[in-house]
Amino acid sequence: MHNLRVGVCYDFRNPPDSGVTDQVLYGEILEQVAWLDQIGADLVWFTEHHFVEDGYLPSWIPVAGAMSSVTKHVRFGTDICLMPFNHPIRLAEDLAVLDNLSGGRVEVGLGMGYAPHEFRGFGFPVSRRVSLMEEGIEVLQKCFSGERFSYQGKRYQFEDVVITPGYVQEGGPPLWVAAMSEAGAMRAAKYNANFLPQGLRSNSYDPWIEKLRATDRNPGDYRVGIIRSILVTEDRDRDWQVVRAAERYRMALYQRFFEESGEGFGEKGEPVPQTWIVGNVDDCVTELLKFINDFGITDIVSMAVPPGMRAEQMGDSLEMLFSQVVPRLKTELAKAD
């Protein structure tokens, strides 16, 4: 199994009643990431959505570029970058620049989106998302090869393309694919990508495992990542109230998206857990170990600034996470190996 990596995730959502400007929020998060880099965080991931009233992050690469200048260790990634809304050649170029700026510390997790308003905003129907996703992945993989290529697809046609500057990482940034359906799981396996499972276990994680094994591939050769937030606290009653309110606000948007799209809403079954883990150091270590072992998790990130909160409000929890919880997790997992 791959080594465990633990980090944080940002969406930069700023509710209208937060009392802080977007500019101040961005500055606070930049300072927080510089600190997290020093205390042991492995990852900084971003989520992407468009045309959301509270400023949900629509463009993660400029932010990662800024963060790369104040960090030395953390690796940047996405769960997820919405492939249909990103031109694959331009995305490949931006990733090449970021790979150089960061010294080879960038990865990219791709998904195809589902919120109807985003497709309306970009001016094409939801029905194109599968072809845009799959052709986008194919083009990115050709770009990451460093070789000159041409491509003829339904959505994209390119002649005589080579990406410059070259990538720091051989083969380009590691590629991840998200899935909340069996079709998505098959897509991740088809493109030999690392995996970001979402939704029901029976719809995503299990079919992916089965497909890899059926094609003589070892699931342990791939990374499996997820956003699952962690609040480390000695006083749950005091600290969880504020975070719970922020989490309810955060999840209301996704519920709206699911209702509007009709996808995955109301399905019954065992989910891939993405609920908060809340407790003291011992509680968090115990629950995280079980979760990691149950789903083969190699990468886990926690929301570092839930919507409406300030960066400093999560400081104590994050410090305990990276100074106490994560070292114990890595030690226990090393013993198991």
Image: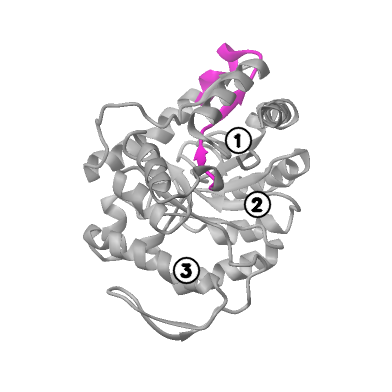
* 234 magenta-colored: yes
Residue at 53% in and 48% down: 222
Q: Is residue 292 above or below residue 117?
A: above
| Residue furthest front in the image | 216
| Residue kind at label 3, given as amino acid type | Leu
Q: Nearer the viewer, residue 256 or 139?
A: 139
Q: Which residues are magenta?
A: 222-243
| Residue kind at label 1, given as amino acid type | Arg
Horizontal side of 139 relative to 317 (left or right) equals: left
Residue 87 in sight here: no
Q: Which residue is mark 2?
A: 75
Q: Nearer the viewer, mark 3 or mark 2?
A: 3
| Residue kind at label 2, given as amino acid type | Arg
Res. 310 mark: 1
Q: Which residue is mark 3?
A: 140
Horizontal side of 310 relative to 129 (left or right) equals: right
Do the residues under discs 1 and 3 have CB atoms within 8 angstroms? no
Q: Nearer the viewer, residue 86 or 310?
A: 86
